[in-house]
Amino acid sequence: MFLIHNRIYKVIALAALFSLALQAGWPFRKKKYEDPITKKTDQPDKVLFDKSINDIEHGRFEVARITLNTLINTYDTSEYLAKAKLAIADSWYREGGTHAWAQAEAEYKDFKLFYPTMEEAAESQEKVCLIHYKQMEKADRDRNQAQRAEDECRQLLLDYPNSKFAPQAQQMLRNVQEVLAQGEYTTAKFYFAKGSYPAAANRLQYVADQYPLFSQADENLWMLADSYRRMGDRFEDRAAAAYTRIVKDYPLSGHADEAAEKLKAMNRPVPEADPARYALQKYEEENRSRIGIKSKVLDAFRHSPETRMAAKSGSPMMTSIRPSVPLSVPAAPPVTNTPAGGVSDVTVQTVSDTTALDTKPDARASAGGAGSAGSAAPAGGQAAAGTAEGSAARSAESPATEQASTASAQPLPMNHQNLIKKSKKQKKAEEEAKKKQAALAQQQGQAQPAAAQQQQGQAQPAAAQPPAVQPATKPNQ
């Protein structure tokens, strides 16, 4: 009986100790600080710094920040001033959460602003990149954090290309660009399935130009060529360019042979495979980790995107290109003092001259006046001379110019041109209208021969009537 009570007391004591340890933050929230200052001294600023580091390691972030702010405000010439500002940012970063990470980003950028030449400046930029990388969502969701992560990782590679954080930032940039490319590609597939080929081609072309390391770049180019092919013969050159990129840059793709056959059918030259691209694609195929069944099942419950298919080598794109305007959008009309074809951008400019509206004519009015004046035909011999000069100029035009003008006169490709769904009532009404038109045409066809015969019958008797015969008179005896 005594032994049983003794064991109960031991269990109660262990439980009490465990609860006290949990309240103190051990062992789950204790994590050693990455770069503490180990110099042993009894200076007040060093004592405050050591205390704050101990609080950060045990998860007492608010207490640590109060201590660090006391150090900064009291000892403004301390040698631990820079470390204290970095420790404040690290405390926000370790605390985690959307609000804490936003505060950490602001603190890290302040540290870079005040201490740009210190080694910890590259670490601060790397932490900013990680803040957005950890908040990045899946490809089919909001891409704001992914775009911010792309910008911050690029900034790290541009500002600190030789730092120890550069290789990790480069791989993170590849992962981020894989997610962004997957999102654009998924949207393009949706447009392609709906029959919106101009919208699909616009996004597919952007993915092909902006993200060449995309794991499904060959599939992207194949769908791009198919979109151009479905839009008509005017876009045959663009389709051939997509097929050429598949054969040249992605020789191990499953569409390489099909793309070569397409080029032969279009009477286009088939390029040779690029050896550098072949080696890069072979390395990616050998080192790319596949997604298992377990990962696919758990992916539905995961907040972060899947980046196993991202490239492990190659240089990611360090610049951002502007997406082009879809082919279904008409070009702006030509404007005075602008290149042919006009512009589609709207710019805002501050006018310092307040008399511009009174002294300078409106550009649209002058263009219209010129057009109206030019459209008025001159009189007399000038008109004949102008006509002769115009015909001579038209005859001197090259065949390429004529083809370009003919292509520009053709209608633009439209979205959903083959997938217009009609109700049963509309289809029935159209069929009835077609039947009425056919019956009316048949009646008109029968009425026209009858009218012609009637007109011919009225004209023939008058024309075939013999002359009147007068009786013969006997001669006088």
Image: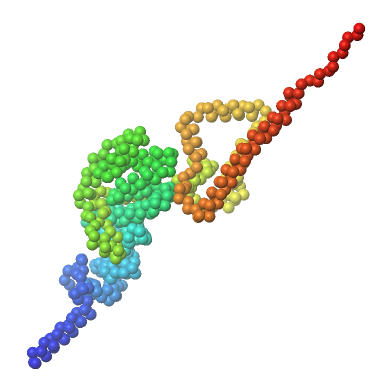
Q: Residue furthest right?
A: 477
**93 versus 230 height, above or below:** below
Q: Position of residue 250 (x, y in %)?
A: 27, 43
State the residue at coordinates (28%, 67%). Answer: 93
Q: Residue furthest top?
A: 477
State the residue at coordinates (88%, 9%). Answer: 475
State the residue at coordinates (48%, 29%). Answer: 398
State the residue at coordinates (26%, 63%). Answer: 297
Give the image quarter of residue 262: top left
Viewer-side residue, 190 vs 462: 462
Q: Position of residue 365 (x, y in %)?
A: 60, 45
- How many callouts does the rendering have? 0
Asked if residue 100 lies left or right of residue 54, the reply is: right
Q: Position of residue 165 (x, y in %)?
A: 24, 57
Asked if residue 370 lies left or right of residue 82, the reply is: right
**130 versus 270 height, above or below:** below
